Image: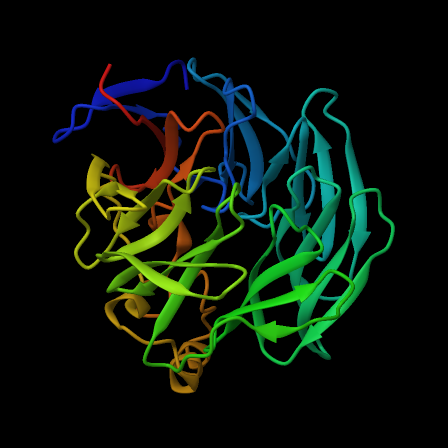
Amino acid sequence: MSGILTVPDRSTGVEVFQITDHPSINHPAYFLQSSFTPDGSKIVFTSYRTGTPQLFLADFPGGGVVQLTQAAPVHPYSAAIRDNRLFFVRSGEIWVHDLKSGCERRIAAFDGQLGEVSPDAVGDWLVAAIKTSDGCGLVCGRSDGSQWCLIPFPRTVIHPQFHPLEPEWIEFAGDPAPRMHRVRRDGTGLECLYGHGNDEFVVHEAFVAQTGNLVFTVWPRLLCEMDWTTRRIRTIAELNAWHIAPNRAGTQVLCDTNHPDTGIWLVDAITGFQKLVCHSDSSNQGTQWRKSCYALKEDFIAAQKNNLSWMETPTDTVYGPQWTHPHPAFSHDERLITFTSDRSGNPQVYAARLYVP
């Protein structure tokens, strides 16, 4: 791409940047991670332009693109940046790419399928969900390759993440309900944070960096916050917030919306006031998001009969392709956001300012 296309949003006038324009699948990191480098000069993204998912780096603003990984396919939503280190998953292995030197190093390898890797605040400890022939759980260890252990769990594990202030604790999602759990990184202290049934579709929890509290959605009705210490839950706003990302102070929550898609919003965490940032115009595929409960056994059986994966499949499956979802996330200075949109026919990487110049 020779240069970044910039257009004002049709409703708010904020500056929206189209970062990629390749006729393939392109998307930034998952909503729990910032795709911007700490200095804000580059954006890490995944692209299938070479035939398999690989990691790339785009100048911002500017548009120059460099390919970072070139070996076996990477987990498309596994990129996580800490300083100049880019952590990611490749098959059953956790790797780190040095953004300055371009060198790669394998940190740990496992006989199983890994989810995305999640570092603690400084990148000292890493955690990832794992599924093996023996069951499910988490793997946790240091980024220097030491002290790795497997923590078993009786159900599928999704999106483990370290507590920002107490990194000995890991919060993770159990699939299906009840969703939110925590465990110490040595495997002790396992407990459910909130007991609920299939009637409450709790999803997409994320930590507030400065308080350690959790924000989450009860799809498609509520945006909520849980006090990490007391477990008290309060409703921030009644809206169909979908994927969410709180700012570091916990004063605002960034979210996309679906059924209906009214755009990407900033929600005041105290008053619940909602401010439109921009429209994503993503197709937001996936039959699961038309429901207000978790996928049940029959949903997975239906997907398996069609030889389909519940995470990466067409619109007639449980969750649908993730790259059709916006997954908005903040830049490190919280003045910009990234998101995905397939408005042009192919998923592309976009960025938007949070104010009108």
Residue 128 position within the rendered picture, expressed as x and y whole percent measured from the top left? 66, 57
Position of residue 320 relative to residue 282, above or below, is below
The residue lying at 35 percent from left, 71 percent from top is 201
Q: Quadrant of residue 24?
A: top left
Q: Residue furthest front?
A: 230
Q: Quadrant of residue 137?
A: bottom right
Residue 279 appears in view? yes
Position of residue 338 relative to residue 241, above or below, is above
Residue 41 position within the rendered picture, expressed as x and y whole percent measured from the top left? 51, 17
Q: Can you say which quadrant of the picture contains the N terminus?
A: top left
**Total numbered labels placed on residues in the image:** 0
Residue 242 position within the rendered picture, expressed as x and y whole percent measured from the top left? 32, 55
Q: Nearer the viewer, residue 342 or 326?
A: 326
Position of residue 176 relative to residue 218, above or below, is below
The residue lying at 71 percent from left, 49 percent from top is 126
Applied colour scheme: rainbow
Q: Residue furthest right?
A: 146
Q: Residue furthest left?
A: 11
206 vs 266, left or right, is: right
Residue 301 position within the rendered picture, expressed as x and y whole percent measured from the top left? 44, 84
Q: Can you say which quadrant of the picture contains the C terminus?
A: top left
Q: Nearer the viewer, residue 197 or 13?
A: 197
Position of residue 179 relative to residue 272, above or below, is below
32 vs 285, left or right, is: right
Q: Nearer the viewer, residue 294 or 272?
A: 272
Residue 313 appears in view? no
